[in-house]
Image (cartoon, rainbow, N blue to C red):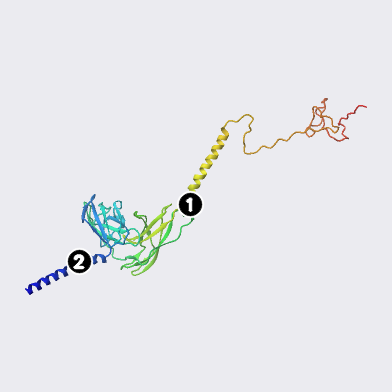
Amino acid sequence: MSGKVRGLRLSAMAAVLALLMLTAGGGPASAAGGPVVTLSAAQAGAGGSVTVRGSGWRSHTLLMVLVCGRATPARGVIGGTNSCANGDGRAVTTDAQGAFGRELPVAEPPVPCPCVVHVATVTGPGAEADAVLQVAGHPVAPLPAEQSGGRLAILSDTRLTGSSGLLTWFGAPPSRTLVFTVGNTGSGTVKDPVFQVGSAHGVFAPQWDDRQWHGTLAPGGKAEVRLPVELSAGAHGDYTVSLEYDGRVLAEQPWGVGRPWGVTLFWILLCLVVPAALFRIGMAVVDRLRPRRPGAARRTGTPRLPRPALRLPRSRTGDAPPTNPTLPWFAPDSVPGDPAGRLSAPHTDSPTSPTTPTTKGPT
């Protein structure tokens, strides 16, 4: 009896130990490996949907969930988001424990499979994870061979330097310089590498531009790289500048662009000046076209001066002026053949003038 009891005890202890080993082996391993993504189904056709669940992410973090082609969990997404079905992606925010669950429509990516469901952070420190998904009916092609040679890696934090000028306040394109230190961790030499610099507004996919850096990096060498970054005219808000090389996203840098208040000020002034000018023009037209009352003087912009009064000269003796006087400064000299004396010499008040008439009073 004691042997049977001892055997039952040993069997129970072995079962408990096995259960503890299984429990300990499942939980901590996935947590220690970083963010994890799982799917409700490993295969789905275009037009269907799968449920994507994740754990091990930062709490309250915005994530982007995409179906991407030409990708594996080991090599990542070759070609970046250009290999993903960006129009059918979904955004999700993790909870306080860093977990999430989101239903994702299955869409065919623009490149052949192998395909994955790619989950990456939108803001903050970069983190990503992939889960294999077979898209039924989508073509499959082998991945491009890995280049055996130089391999670039970021050795320091990226930063944006420079400042915008006065014209940016009036809507000119904002510009900065992306500065980072890159190192060659491969076994070959890298000469004149071409980087892809992308700018994304909010949760939208970035727009990529090629930027070539002229220089040579030997194995184990490093160098500081400066690449120009420019946005479109009138851009404002929260942007994210991404750096990509050989299909891998190397770094991301947030960029807050201020609003061009000069454009707003211009439109406010335009809304005030144009109505005032139209009002003045309309009032001038009405003043020109309205009927006038008899005897009313037309209003003009220049005032009229009073007309000077014409005063006739009086004789020294106090007699009344002649009936038909002549102005002394206007009458010409007398001419022959004028018996009436209408065209006579000008009158003067001098007592020695022979033309001055004299009048004698009664005696």
x, y (%) of residue 336? 82, 27
Circle 1 or circle 2, nearest the eye: 2
x, y (%) of residue 360? 90, 28
Residue in the foreground of this view, choosing between 17 and 243 = 17
Quadrant where the C terminus is found in the figure? top right
Q: Is residue 81 above or below residue 299?
A: below
Q: Residue furthest left?
A: 1
Answer with the quarter of the image where residue 281 lies.
Answer: top right
* Amino acid at the residue labelled 2: Thr
Quadrant where the N terminus is found in the figure? bottom left
Query: Which residue is found at the position 50% from the left and 46% from the top?
Result: 270
The kind of secondary structure element at disc 1 is: helix
Q: Residue furthest front?
A: 1
Q: Is residue 220 above or below residue 255?
A: below
Q: Is residue 263 left or right of residue 146?
A: right
- Using the numbered discs, state the Cα–Cα distance from disc 1 to disc 2 in whole angstroms: 63 Å
x, y (%) of residue 136? 21, 52
x, y (%) of residue 67? 27, 55
Name the residue tied to disc 2: 23
Q: Is residue 16 left or right of residue 1?
A: right
